[in-house]
Amino acid sequence: MKIGITFDLYSEYLALGYDEVAAAEFDSEDTIENIEDSLRRLGHETERIGNVKHLMRLLLDGRRWDLVFNICEGLSGFGRESLVPALLDNHEIPYTFSDPLALSVALHKGVAKRVLRDSGVPTPDFVVIERDADLAAVNLPFPLFLKPVAEGSSKGIDAESRVNTREQLERKGQRLLQEFQQPVLVERYLPGREYTVGIIGTGLEAECIGGMEILLKEGAEPGIYSFQNKREYETVVEYRTIDGVVLESCGVLALQAWRALGGRDAGRVDLREDEVGRVEVMEVNPLAGLNAVRSDLSILCRLRGISYFEMIRRIMTSVEHRIGNPTLLQESARRRSA
Ligand SMILES: Nc1ncnc2c1ncn2[C@@H]1O[C@H](COP(=O)(O)OP(=O)(O)O)[C@@H](O)[C@H]1O
Ligand SMILES: [Mg+2]
């Protein structure tokens, strides 16, 4: 196949004046190279398209591809991850990973949690705060956890995200509203062990390919997989592969969450144990990072002996299978509601 690759390059945004936090979700050159290499080893021809602006220009010029391998995170707004898939849908060009609906629902953690709750997937009780005045009306038991409603890479998440008092809640809530200019999710704090699980596939054919526990070492910001801990992961985080009943229980929930939100091809689900050791879903990542060295999905694959190339090969198998079977998703939805 002739495969175009869409991506947001970190260095390109830094050069445009974006700071490290604003550009935190974007990809480095080696990620694109590794994807490209893997696709070529699979016998495909590749072309680097770049970000949505480059894609728009090429589409207007009449350019087409058999498939687009899309890892664009987008720049702003709740539709930022959906922009590229929506354009490609409109041009009837197939692409990897989720569609605009799944991507925008998963991006907005409040909406995503409503869907999860409605599907019977355990996730902490929550409210979404739109302005300072809403904080006084929060009626959930402490400790609570606060995060921007639609960010990733643990943006805005630090030692103050866990709050024990009204005063701390007001302070962190106001700060997040101000800094990120978007609603804030307030949810029950999950005090237990943290896991992340990898999924490959779509609908009923999705499978859990493994998972890992995230352990924080001495010197880490305690208790949370925060922005700072993610940045310093080499020294402060230990990733331990999970198996047996832990993997089984995380995997069942992760697949339920994945299917409920309509995830496709590959992604990750983040989970944590509550005060009685019951696993709950924190969030679903339908556009998981694909850096061969640093990204959680690649790390958890590596811990299970799945090479980066093998991971991309399995993603491509899912895409090819899905494109050849357009009824796969509808069938999955029908069986779920039956
Ligand atoms: N309800 C919660 N209770 C405890 N820790 C949480 C909770 N929600 C998030 N966290 C911590 O914050 C991290 C980032 O939150 P997450 O929802 O995964 O957002 P992101 O999209 O930034 O990865 C998690 O990995 C976890 O360590
Ligand atoms: Mg996460």
Image (spheres, rainbow, N blue to C red):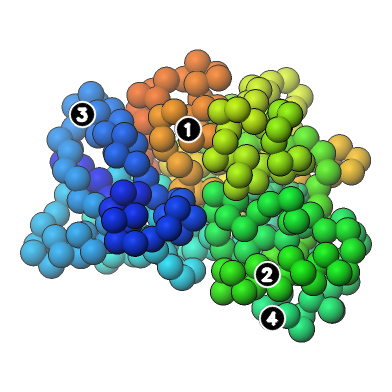
State the SS at label 2.
helix
Q: Closer to us: mark 3 or mark 2? A: 2
Q: Which amino acid does label 3 sit on?
A: Arg
- Picture quadrant of residue 89: bottom left
Q: Which amino acid type corresponds to the residue marked 1 in the rendered image?
A: Arg
- Disc 2 target residue: 175
Alpha carbons under labels 1 and 4: distance apart: 35 Å
- The numbered disc on residue 127 is none
Residue type for callout 2: Arg
Q: Circle 3 sits on which residue?
A: 40
> Earlier along the polypeptide chain: callout 3 or callout 1?
3
- Residue of label 1: 294
* Residue at 46%, 70% in the rendered image: 77
Asked if disc 1 and disc 4 are in contact, CB closer than 8 Å, the reply is no
| Mark closer to the chain start, 3 or 2 | 3
Q: From the viewer's perspective, is residue 270 above or below residue 58?
A: above
* Side of 310 where 299 appears, left or right: right
Residue 252 x, y percent position in the rendering: 68, 37
Residue closest to the eye, 192 or 105: 192
How far from the left and from the top, in percent, is residue 302? 50, 21
Q: Is residue 94 visible?
A: no
Label whose residue precedes the other's in the sequence (1 or 2):
2
Q: Where is residue 191 in the image (x, y as percent from the top left)?
A: 83, 43
